[in-house]
Image (cartoon, rainbow, N blue to C red):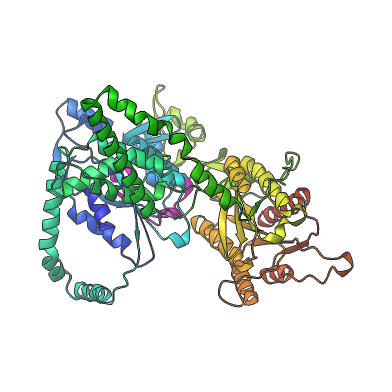
Amino acid sequence: MKFALILNAINPRIGGVLIRGDKGTAKSTAVRALADLLENIKVVEDCPFNCDPENPEEMCDLCFENSQANRIKGIERKTPVIDLPLGATEDRVVGSLNVERAIKEGIRALEPGILAAANRGILYIDEVNLLDDHVADVLLDSAAMGVNIVEREGVSVAHPSKFILVGTMNPEEGEIRPQLLDRFGLQVSVVGIEDVDQRMQIAKMADAFDADPDRFASEQQPIQDELKMKISLAKELLGRVALSDDLLRTIASTCIDLGVKTHRAEIVISRTAKTIAAFDGRTEVTQEDVKKAMELALAHRMRSRPFEPPTLNKDKLDKSLEKQQQEQEQQQQQQGQKQKNPPQQKKQEQPPENQQPEKPDEPHDQNHSQAATPPEQIFEIGSPIDVRQICMPRKRDKILRRKTSGRRINTLALRNRGRYLRQKMPNGGKDIAIDATIRAASPYQKARCGPNAIRVKSEDIREKERVAKTSAMLLFVVDASGSMGAMQRMESAKGAVLSLLMDSYQKRDKIGMVAFKGKDAEIVLPPCSSVDLAQRCLQELPTGGKTPLSAGLSRGLQLLQGEMRKDAETKLMMVLVSDGRANEGMGGKIREELMEISERTKQLGVHTIVIDTEVVDSSFMDMRLGYCREIAQTIGGRYYPISSLSSDSLYNIVDGEQRLLIEANA
């Protein structure tokens, strides 16, 4: 963790670092301590954007105009390390236009936000995985362009915003968005120290700091100064570090071999490898530098599915690097032989090349032998349903005020988003209704000023009241054990999920899917509204094995808790599709586990539907052996016994429950 932070302090172009780890592992402490190792930067005096007085290309409009007239003054300031609060609004992050001042004085008045303060510094986001989606989108735009643009009422203001993005997160609270994840140059995982002596030393140092902070800081200052000097020397040396074409080819070939799709990987690895060499005082990058850089830059770029925990198989990485090195050595030997022995030697080398097509027979036989083992069964997706004729009810008599966005039901938006509904008296916001403000000021213009100007007073200001629509989070917890393979249950479940996802895409809802089989449960479809991603995930879902029902419910509850942490007003709904015949627990008694998880789900306020797919004789409908009915009673949810599950019946149940949920909250 410290090494990755130091590398970014030397070379900000690496792109920041994401720190994953359990609570209490000094993630936030390390990031904030980095500020003492950073050198001072030159900034324009009284500029809120930390503009560089020596680089006109990185100045705001006002500083650029002053520099052309030689009216600019530079001062030294500490490199800023800015915290982004988790609940920060979009206006607080990007800044806002003072529309009232713009109307009165006719100027572009920008009130700087967090992105302005973080320019040429470090933007630190604690619990970055819980960041609101709309704020994450703004960060993505600014990180990509290096410019922050604030637009309001036809007025647009831009300022430079180049920063090192540093984020920390606890994986237990959910994964990070894939689009935001790739923006982090490096990623490290932090775990608690298991050495007794080191843990004792941590406690002693904490006590020493609490007893006398000044003395503790002075004792550690020589080490800090030494490291700070080493970082400064590395910055000076960085521009002279060279990366050979052979190593760059190794980087690109290894990324392809490991299945890394993003081209940002090669760029980050090469920059990181050069920085490692500079930190060690060298001007040539070695293979070991490349390997260290790959371990830091590839883990979060190797996931085959979104929201999977990022992992890097180091053995596979070592084999790939060895393979690339051997191929390069062979190519160098062949080139040397061609220069010494042109035609005759080539003819002698041709027979082995002609024999190469026979080599694939061996792996073919291995695959054939593996195919003899009976694989898990994968069912096709059932027929989707046309849901265009089904509409959600609208409440015209009452409009709620919420922060969530979507298209389910009209709400008054707390954030400045949505359709302009009507004007209202100001309440400390920045969303000025220019038309209503001018109408309020117009009767008094004759007495206030001449014919060629408009004068607006504070009492004339009106704000906009916007209307938006809420969304819901619908999570399917699907039994993928062997029993779901009977009577086309899995095909019907897949078809219904895909149909509901198509409907949710239009209404901007989120739909996720957790499947449980064997001994564990996994997130098959993370909360999203992507039909293409859903179809791929559902298509590959196998069926077979035991029924770990408690693991499925527990995984689903964790996922919903993560969504609620992001937005407490999200409406949560869980659909359990299972025969209820649990035969695999999580270490305890199965029934006690199920009841305990059901109680926690009820306390969270999740609207739950339990669809029992157990097939029983019609004359013994009450003799079901599974836990579905008991789970529904404990969880306070709806219970639907279905002997022959179809896409239509499942869709009708879920859609009807969604209507009831929306109406209940309206």
Q: Is residue 499 left or right of residue 337?
A: right
Residue 395 in view: no
Q: Nearer the viewer, residue 73 or 229?
A: 229
Q: Is residue 407 left or right of residue 234?
A: right
Question: Residue 100 magenta-drawn?
Answer: no
Residue at 60 percent of width and 74 percent of height = 593
Residue 292, compared with residue 439, is above or below; it is below
Residue 20 at x, y = what percent?
38, 58
The magenta stretch is 114-133
Q: Is residue 565 left or right of residue 165?
A: right
Residue 307 at x, y = what percent?
49, 51
Residue 249, compared with residue 25, is above or below; it is above
How many numbered marks appear?
0
Q: Nearer the viewer, residue 23 or 642?
A: 642
Quarter residue 519 falls in: bottom right
Q: Residue furthest right?
A: 619
Residue at 42 percent of width and 47 percent of height = 302
Residue 32 at x, y = what percent?
26, 58
Q: Is residue 528 left or right of residue 591?
A: left
Q: Nearer the viewer, residue 410 or 620?
A: 620
